[in-house]
Amino acid sequence: MTSLHHITTAGLLLGAILVTVHARASMLFEYASDPLAWQWGLFNNEPGDYGQQSPSPVFGFSFTVPDSWLSSSSPSTFTVPVENVTTGEQYFQTIDVNPGAGGTLTVNPDGSVASWNFSMLLTELPVPRDPIYDVFDRRIYLTSAYGSGTCNCDVFHLKNTLFTYNGEFFEPLGPAEALYSGANAPAAWTTTPISAVPEPGAVAMLLSGLSLLAAYGWRRRAQDGRPAADPLPAI
């Protein structure tokens, strides 16, 4: 019985270690820009105040990084894809992030962000209900960089084609652009640890091991001539 107890205990400990080793832990990185100041506007390639009356734009993005990418002894630099991008609602209804958009990020051993350099292209995706009315042609080029040799700034470059309705259909007025920018700092980042989640394979292996240990226990009881469980009381 003592031997069986030791084997069971060892099996449980090994199972716990197995789940811990195969668990997926990660860090959620979230960036939020400050409101960006209007710098200049163009309409039909002529200087103007296009965009100046709009609310100051802001943007943000986020992604997760596996703990295995981070070093506990030196800064870690890696390239990450942007999973989620947000802008002020006045600019986009539905956002499409350019495939491969993203940049580099350097993280200190304590998990704080040291530097970054991101460049993204966002476009608006219209719902094609009516080709006469669905005339969206809006693009935003986002840049966020901080560190040695960078601008230490956020840039929001809006490119749009303006349309007017003549009573029958929309016709283009011409291209319009606006540029907004502002300073940034590492304080714009928020990092959140994500609890480890055991991988399905690790859980399956653990359950298989526990099943084998249980079967071994029943077999030992049968060999010792003991009942596998207390008999039910007679009625």
Image: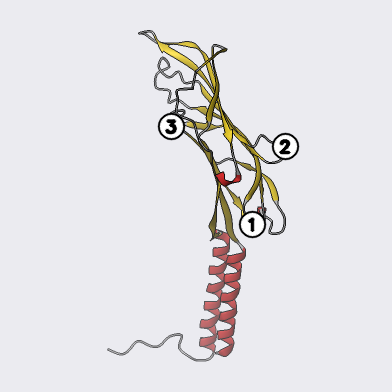
N-terminal label among 1 and 2: 1
Name the mark nearer the viewer: 3 or 2. Answer: 2
- The x, y position of residue 66, in whole percent, is 61, 53
Q: Quadrant of residue 182?
A: top right
Location of the N terminus (image quadrant): bottom right
User: Identity of the amino acid at label 2?
Assistant: Gly
Q: Quadrant of residue 68?
A: bottom right
Residue at 53% over, 68% down? 207
> Mark 2, residues whose alpha carbon is within 10 Å: few (<14), some, or many (≥20)?
few
Q: CA distance from mark 1 to mark 2?
A: 23 Å
Residue at 47% over, 11% down? 172
Residue 80: give its label.
none
Q: Is residue 122 above or below residue 173?
A: below
Residue at disc 1, secondary structure: loop
Q: Which residue is mark 3?
A: 89
Q: Nearer the viewer, residue 144 or 127?
A: 144
Side of 210 relative to 69 (left or right): left
Residue 149: give its label.
2
Q: Which residue is mark 1?
A: 110
> Can the viewer see residue 100?
no
Side of 207 relative to 151 (left or right): left
Q: Is residue 208 above or below residue 37?
A: below
> Can the viewer see residue 153?
yes
N-terminal label among 3 and 1: 3
N-terminal label among 3 and 2: 3
